[in-house]
Amino acid sequence: MTAVTAAPVSASPTSASPTPRQVWTRTRGLLCAVLLLVAAGIVLATTRSGDQHGRLDPRSADQHGSRAVAELLKDRGVSVHVVTALDEAIAAVGPDTTLLVTAPNLLTPYQQNELRTATAASAGRTVLLGAGPPSVSTLAPGVRANSSGPVATRAPRCSLPAARTAGNADTGGFHYTAGSLATGCYPSAGLPTLLLVQEKDAGDTVLLGSADLLYNNRLDNQGNASLALQLLGSRPHLAWYLPSLADPTATRNGDGVGTGDGTSDGTNTERSFFDLIPPGWLWGTLQLAIAAVLAAIWRARRLGPLVTELLPVVIRASESTEGRARLYRKANARDRAASSLRSATRTRIAPLIGVPPHGAHSAAVLLPAVSACLSTTEGDLSSLLFGPAPADDAALVRLADQLDNLEREVRTS
C-alpha cells in the first residue's frame, strides 16, 4: 500500500511573502505624502511666525490691515490703543477719545446696548465701520441702514469740512438715512455712504458704509488718507476696538448675567469641556468627516460586474500564479486558495485514473478510484482532496505539498 506523504515545510519565505523591496514600494508613496505635509506645515509656521493679525488690525502690515493709517495717526500725535473686549472699550471712551468699532455687526444686543450707553454719556467721537441693520438702530438711534453697494471712488457732495478737504475717496457699502442733525457725504444711489450724526449734549457718531479706505493697499488712493486722518484724529486718543467672539461679554444677556457657560458676572466659574474647545472645532470636525467619506469612496470596492479586457502583453503563467497568490494572501483567503489547489489537482488526476471529467469533483466517484489506484484509505484522501480550509499559511503550504505528492504518485502508479 502506498501512503501519501507530506514534503517537509521549508523555513524560507514563500512566493506570497512580501520582500523588503516590495514593502518599500508599497509604502513610499504614503511616506512621501506625510513628509510633504510636515514640510508644508513647517514652512507655513515659519512664514506666519511674525506679526500676523486680522483684517483692519492696526498692527497688521497685510494688504487688508490698517497699520499704515495707525502709523500716520501716531506721527500726528494721536495715541492708538487696541482693545478687543467690551469692558476695555467702555473704559476707554471719553471726551478726548475717538472710539473706532471695526465690526459693529458682530456685537450682541447686550454689547450694543452697553456700548451705546457708554458713548452717549461721553463727549467723544464714535466711528462705526460697515454698521448694518443688525447694529445701526442701537448704536446710532434714528439712523437706518439700507442695502450694501460696491466700493468706488466718489465725490463728497456735502459741506462736511473733513470730506471737502479730502475730496474724492473710496467709499461704498451700506447707505444711510437719518434726521436733520446728520450730515451725509459721498452719496451712492442718492443715499450717503458716510454719515456724521451730532447729538445734543453728547459726542458725535460717524458711520462709514465700508472700511475699505482704511486698508493698507487703499490708503494712498484718492483722498482716503486725508479722510481717514480727519475722521480718526479729531481727538488726541484713539481706541481701536476689534470685537471678538471670545469676549466674555458676548455670552451675557440683557440682565448682565451669563447664559450658563461660566463667563457671566463672576458668580459662576464652572465651565464645561466644550467651552474650552476653540470655536472652529466644529468646522474642523466637519472637514475631517468629509475627507474621511471621500477617502472611503476612493478606496472602496467598485460596484457592478467585472469587465473582461484583453491583456496588453503576454504574462507568463508563473507570474500570473504568483500574482494571484499575493492577492489571496493580502485578503487572507486561505479557503479560496485551498479550494483552487484541490480543484486543479482533482481535474488533473481524474483522467489518469479513468474518471470522467464530470466526476472529477464528486467525492463518491473520485475517492474510490484514487484509493484503488494507490491502495490508500478513502478517509485520508477525503481530508486531502475535499477537506476543510487550512487554519494558517503554514497549513496551506503543507496542503499544496501534499497535493503535489499525490499527483506525482498517481502519475507514477
Image (spheres, rainbow, N blue to C red):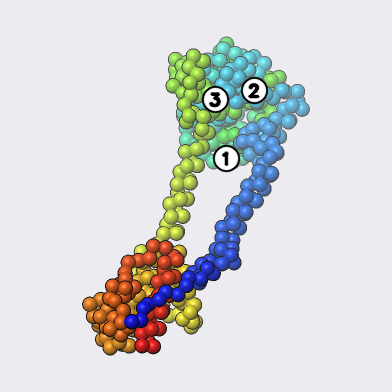
Q: Quadrant of the N terminus?
A: bottom left
Element carrying mark 1? strand
Q: Residue at x 71, y 19 (%)?
A: 236
Looking at the image, do the residues carrying marks 1 and 3 touch, with CB atoms under 8 Å apart? no
Q: Residue at x 47, y 50 (%)?
A: 291
**Measured Cα–Cα span from mark 2 to mark 3:** 17 Å
Looking at the image, do the residues carrying marks 2 and 3 touch, with CB atoms under 8 Å apart? no
Q: Residues within 10 Å of mark 1 (few under 14, many from 20)?
A: some
**Residue bearing the label numbered 2:** 239
Instruction: Identify the disc placed on residue 323.
Output: none
The residue lying toward the viewer, choosing from 147 and 322, is 322
What amino acid type should be assigned to the residue bearing mark 2?
Ala
What amino acid type should be assigned to the residue bearing mark 3?
Asp
Instruction: Identify the disc placed on residue 247.
Output: 3
Where is residue 4, by image quadrant? bottom left
**Label located before the other in sequence (2 or 3):** 2
- Toward the left, the furthest residue is 364
**Label located before the other in sequence (1 or 3):** 1
The residue lying toward the viewer, choosing from 227 and 109, is 109
Q: Is residue 194 visible?
A: no
